[in-house]
Image (cartoon, rainbow, N blue to C red):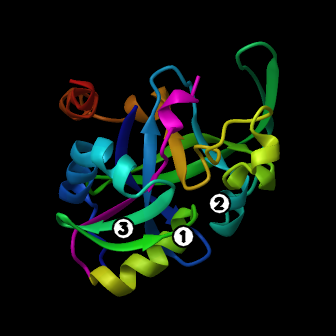
Amino acid sequence: MVLNLGLESRKWINKHLPELRKKYPNKTIIVCGEAIIETVDSPLDPIQVNEIARKLCKGKDWSYTYVSEHEEEYIL
Amino acid sequence: MILIDIEVYNNVKGLYEIFEAIVDTGATFSVIAEHIAKKMGYTPEEKIHLWQVNSPLVLSKSTLKIKYKEKECNVGGVIVNIHKDYLRLATPEEKCKRPITPHPLTGRMILGKNFLDKLTKKERKEILAYLA
């Protein structure tokens, strides 16, 4: 299967990250285009995320992130 | 923090997996967590001694097969072991000992300068423009 590198979905995540931190704190979200299609209440490794996204996004542009509520305050 | 997507080859499954990556121009090497490297069939090679903030850090090297915008490249990576308790949120009792959030590499990797060096000037500019 050809995977589409989530360029548009990534742009959308990066643009909306401040709001996402308030709305989906400490959840893993999978974004397809400009829509959140799955939220998981825990951090996942990328292989687990890819397994879910392959089923849900079926060749469409997608991306993911763990929406850490306070992460940027804690990275050196 | 600059977050981008790349594809990393999974040697076990024989396909590329999409990864969220932190771009770190201050890191010499790209970094992948051991729990992910193991699942993807990246085996530790020779040891390397690096400086972290206040002490040396000894890690294992490995060569990561990465694809960015359809361009494949082999990138020197280091495999870092993250204690399994750091792959989750902190419990209230831990608050003073560690940040609340899971380790940033729980579900991601770091792309260091050795990855950026493989890109064109235009691609590097596009990535760094996320800071703007």
Residue ID for mark 2? B36
The subunit carrying tag 2 is B
The quarter holding residue B120 reads top left
Please give left or right for residue B124 compared with residue A76 in the image. left
Q: Amino acid at mark 1?
A: Ile
Q: For the residue labelled by badge 2, is the local secondary structure a helix, a strand or a loop?
A: helix
Dot 3 and dot 1 within a common chain = yes
Taking the image as drawn, is residue A67 in sight? yes
Q: Determine whether, in the image, residue B15 is placed left or right of residue B59.
A: left
Q: In the rendered image, which quarter contains the N terminus of chain B? A: top left
Tell me which amino acid carries mark 3. Answer: Ile
Residue indicated by mark 3: A30
For image coordinates 25% across by 79% down, the residue present is A59
Q: CB under 8 Å between callouts 2 and 1?
A: yes
Question: Residue A52 location in percent, x, y?
Answer: 44, 80
Cα distance, mark 2 to mark 1?
8 Å
Residue B47 locus on image (x, y percent):
81, 36
3D distance between C-alphas at marks 3 and 1: 13 Å
Q: Nearer the viewer, residue A5 or A76?
A: A76
**Dots 3, 2 in contact, CB < 8 A:** no
Q: Is residue A28 above or below residue B124?
A: below
The answer to which quarter of the image holds residue A47 is bottom right
Q: Same chain for labels 2 and 1? Say yes or no.
A: no
Q: Position of residue B26 (x, y in %)?
A: 51, 19
Mark 1 highlights which residue? A47
Which label sits in the foreground, 3 or 2? Answer: 3
The residue at the point 74 percent across, 38 percent down is: B95
Type of amino acid under label 2:
Ile
Q: Is residue B82 visible?
A: no
Q: Position of residue A20 (x, y in %)?
A: 33, 51
Query: At 22% across and 68% down in the image, what residue appears?
Result: A61
